[in-house]
Image: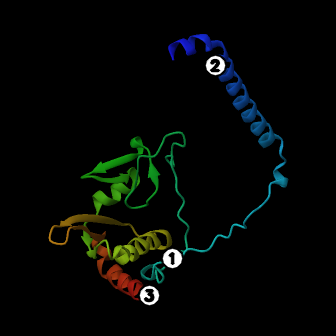
Amino acid sequence: MNQFLQDNSIIIIGILILIIFLLMGAMIFILFRLLTTPKDNVPVTKELVVEKPILNPMFTNLKRSETPIVERFYCIHHTEAPSVASCLICEEVFCASCLVEHESMHFCKEHFRIFANCKWKQITDVRTTPDTPEEGLYIYNFKREIWLDKNIPTFVMTHYKINIENDFIESFIQLNVREEDVEKLTNEILKYRALD
């Protein structure tokens, strides 16, 4: 066998080089055809139909906010500085130099003064679970609307708890309002929830 390989090594190498050239030629031909075929001559085999997704029934009656949410990645005061967090009251995004952190809460400098100078009361404590994630959505919408429409400062805090018995994480969504707004906003959020 070794003698056969030695005697015919030039022929074997020649055959291998020929196979390599044939494969390279085929690849070049295919590439050339792909690059020179006009795009409008490409046959369409099936029309693409995009169907609207079917919503989970639990989300069909959610109230949508009229004001669109705009996602920002840079500080509203320093357009070259990336945002690091949003203010709990106005929900605008700010860079590190424009934010004040207090007990893991972030406020812009203007609204930190409001936070520090007011007494705050919690008026909601809505529990959500993995099966009911939409339960507290109305609180976020209400908070946003009273800020945009009436300029009333509030902030939402979410606390998480591990439910060991049922093996899931539950959250408690708490709306905090100024002490002088408690009665008025408690009534308003009840009406808002009823409309939801």
Label located before the other in sequence (2 or 1): 2
Front: mark 2 or 1: 2
The kind of residue on which mark 3 rests is: Leu
Counting from the top left corner in percent of width and height, residue 17 is at 68, 21
Give how far apart the Cα atoms at labels 3 and 2 are: 84 Å
Q: Dot 3: what SS?
A: helix
The kind of residue on which mark 2 rests is: Ile
The kind of residue on which mark 1 rests is: Arg
Label 3: which residue?
195
Q: Residue furthest left?
A: 165
Q: Residue at x 72, y 34 (%)?
A: 27
Give how far apart the Cα atoms at labels 3 and 1 are: 12 Å
Label located before the other in sequence (3 or 1): 1
Label 1: which residue?
64
Pick whichever, 146 or 19, lies toward us: 19
User: Image quadrant of residue 50?
Assistant: bottom right
Pick whichever, 106 or 53, lies toward us: 53
Give how far apart the Cα atoms at labels 2 and 1 are: 74 Å
Label 2: which residue?
12
Q: Residues within 10 Å of mark 1 (few under 14, many from 20)?
A: few
Q: Residue at x 51, y 76 (%)?
A: 64
